[in-house]
Amino acid sequence: QIKTRLFSVSPQFLLLAAISIPCLPRLPVLGSLPWLGGGLPPHLLFSQLAHRYGSLFALHLGPHYTVVVNDHRHAKEVLLQRGRDFAGRPNMVTTDLLTRGGKDIAFADYSPLWKLHRRLVHNSFTLFGEGTSRLQDIVLSSVDSLCAELLSGGRLGFDPSPAVTRAVTNVVCTLVFSATYRHGDAELQEVIRYNDGIVQTIARGGLVDIYPWMRFFPNKSLRKLKDSITVRDRLLTRKLEEHKASLTDGDPRDLLDALLKGQTGKSPGSEDEGITDDHVLMTAAEAFGAGVETTSTTLLWILAYLLHHPEVQDRVQKELDENIGSERAVCMSDRGRLPYLDCVINEGMRIRPVSPVLIPHTAMTHSSIGGHSVSPGTRVLVNMWSIHHDPQHWDKPDLFNPDRFLDNQGQRVTPSCFLPFGAGPRVCVGESLARLELFLFLSSLLQRMSFRLPDGAPPPNLQGRLGVVLQPLPFKVVVTPRAGWEGGAK
Ligand code: HEM
């Protein structure tokens, strides 16, 4: 019986494994680059190519053979079922510069040291997040200043983006090194400026990340990246030294303390040096790099969609009025009472994933996707945009409809093809922090104020622009306080 089963399955499997993944044409040196023109951002280009080549296809980014995954079934294989096989990261010139050769979490290749480092960061976040109210207190104090700032914006209409970015940056500054800044503080402006410089230049599919030898030629973008990194390192090194000098045996005051306390020495017989000061510094830096732009942009996308759908804003406010009222601020334990708000957040992350293509993964071993064999070193790009817009899984995917996250009984559901934070060994480390921030910021804003378009202004452009994240184009809002919240805070 076993023999028959082997014979009925194996030849098919072997045949599929031998058939290569449909691949774009290629030229020597250039690879498939000549077929990737047309000016579309990668997530839209890949979705378009998937119509021609199928949802799983391959291309050559210069010399690098790269598989593009556009559907949920193959994404789950890469991220979850064979997550270990595909948990590597490619070397890139810009990310190597940014992370001192992969001493961070996001761009470091899979290794025992990386696992240890990731666990330490995860535990440190947990220390300030779930289980304690410290993170909530940090976010709520930032919420108060954001509300006051937005409400002072006047009724003429203004761009909410700088205030939102400042508020989220402030949360990360407090979390990482216990600094809280007032509006206009020079050090906060410095953090925002260098972060912006990095965001504009890092891992943007530039040629230098495909052909590393190009770094030896004059390159304006690489210069800007290096300058921003210098400013970042100067500031963070100062914070690190201050923390080392004042570290006590008591509870960690912030993430830097938690990381310093979790540093391990070189383990006997091991090649690596354990978690070094460089690792601590790169982790602190990454909390800004990975945690500010993603969270603030998600908030801005949701605001943009609320301006298009005032009926959704009304419904969230009704839910807030009925379940919380206006006498007190919203807190994390209210989350279960605000299911519709949760759906609005999810729908925002579905329709405009800020990372429409995940950070590149690489195969660390011989493996397979969809039965096709994949060799070690293959780069894999997961196109979350096409997964979140797949008409086979989402009814009218281009429509903003938070109700799709509720079932017939009004209970919350999370479809398995909704993966805004990725999944598996490389899932976002900041997911619970991000969810906490999104919930507290949005619930507080909508409890305390209403957003509308300035008279005669067109609604925000929803196409977006791809930088390191997919951002909405700048738009203006008019903000009016709701009853009882005229000053922005109690
Ligand atoms: C709305 C906010 C956020 C979204 C949508 C988001 C989404 C993502 C996604 C899609 C990935 C890539 C997963 C992959 O490569 O397969 C990722 C990775 C990561 N995120 Fe986030 N993120 C958010 C906020 C944050 C925050 C607040 C932090 C930390 C302060 C953070 C830290 C990281 C790190 C360190 C990684 C790399 C994980 C690894 O490679 O092992 N993220 N995030």
Image (spheres, rainbow, N blue to C red):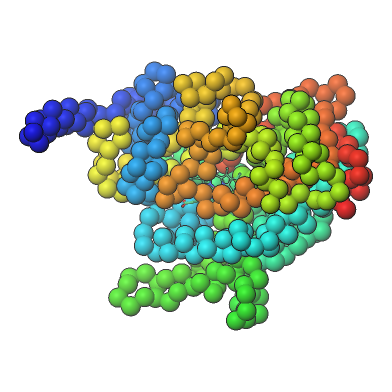
Relative to 244, say whether 295 is above or below: above
Q: Viewed as shown, does residue 122 lie left or right of 246?
A: left
Location of residue 217 in the rendering, given as x and y in whole percent from the top left corner: 48, 47
Viewer-side residue, 74 vs 202: 74
Residue located 81% across and 59% down the image: 182
What percent of the width, then of the height, locates residue 317? Answer: 79, 35
Q: Residue at x 43, y 43 (%)?
A: 360
Up/down of 167 relative to 56, above or below: below
- All told, the count of numbered labels is 0
Q: Quadrant of residue 226?
A: bottom right
In percent of width and height, residue 274 lies at 42, 71
Left or right of 385? Residue 472 is: right
Query: Vertical placement of 156 versus 95: above or below?
Result: above
Give the camera-side residue of 362 and 139: 139
Residue drawn at (74%, 25%), measured in percent from left and top? 308
- Which is nearer the eye, 219 or 279? 279
